[in-house]
Image (spheres, rainbow, N blue to C red):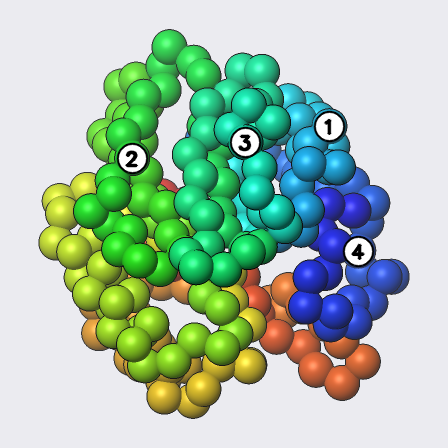
Amino acid sequence: LLDDNCDNTYVDSSSVSDKPNLIFSSKDIHIYSINICHILPKLDELMLLLLENNIHILAAVNPFETAINDFELSIQGYKFERKNRANKSGGGLIVYVKEKESISYTRRFNLENTIESIGIQIKFTNTKPFLINFVYIPPDSRQDWIDIYLKTSLDLLSINFQKYSYSETLIYRLPLIIHVAMVTFYSKYGLTQLITEPTRVTHNTSSIIDHIYTTYPDSV
C-alpha cells in the first residue's frame, strides 16, 4: 500500500498485503526500510505503521516527488533526517528515529558523500553504539557511483562499532561490473546478506532488490 511501484515494474498483487504484517519482539530494536513514492499523501499511513509496530528507526527511499518543506514531513514522537537527490527531482532518502530517552543518535555525514545515503550512529541505553548506513542505488548507476560507495563502505568498516548497511537496489538492472564489484567487496570484508528470498516478483523474473548487510549477523 505504501509502495507506489515507482519504476512501473509489475508486482504480483497476490503476494502483497495492504498492511505490512510485522512481527517484532517487544525487547528488540525495531528497524524498518520501505520504498515509498510520493510521501505526503501517505504520511498518515506511515505514522500508523510507526506507532502500531513500535518502530524505532524507519528509512524510506524515493519519498520526494517535488520540493517538500521539513515541517510537512513531521510525525509526532519521531525526529527525522533527510537527503535529497542531488541535481535532480524525485528520489532521496528520509530516516525517522523514535524520540525516546533511551535512544540517542548522531548523523554521520562523513559516511555519506554525494550518493543517496544517510549514515546514523545509534545508541540505546545499556547497549553498545552501532552504525547504520541506508543507501539507495539507482538502476542507472555507473563505475563512478560504485567507486564512491565502496570508499564510503571502507570508511564505515574502519570504525570499531557494530555495522549494518541497508540498501535498496534493482540488482538485476545494474551493469555487471557494478554487481560483481559489490558482491566481491561484501565477500572480502565478511559482510553477510540477510535477505535471501526474492522481494520483487514479476511475470517473468524474481529478484532480491532489498539488501541488508551486516558484520554481526548473529545480532539480528
Residue type pointed to by label 3? Asn
x then y, percent, for residue 192: 36, 63
> Disc 1 marks which residue?
44
- Disc assigned to residue 69: 3
x then y, percent, for residue 219: 36, 43
Q: Is residue 91 left or right of residue 120?
A: right
Q: Residue furthest right?
A: 14
Residue type pointed to by label 4? Val
Mark nearer the viewer, 2 or 3:
3
The answer to which image quadrant residue 187 occupies is bottom left
Is 69 located above or below residue 5 in the figure?
above
> Disc 4 marks which residue?
16
Q: Is residue 34 left or right of residue 165?
A: right
- Disc assigned to residue 107: 2
Of callouts 4 and 3, the N-terminal one: 4
Of callouts 2 and 1, the N-terminal one: 1
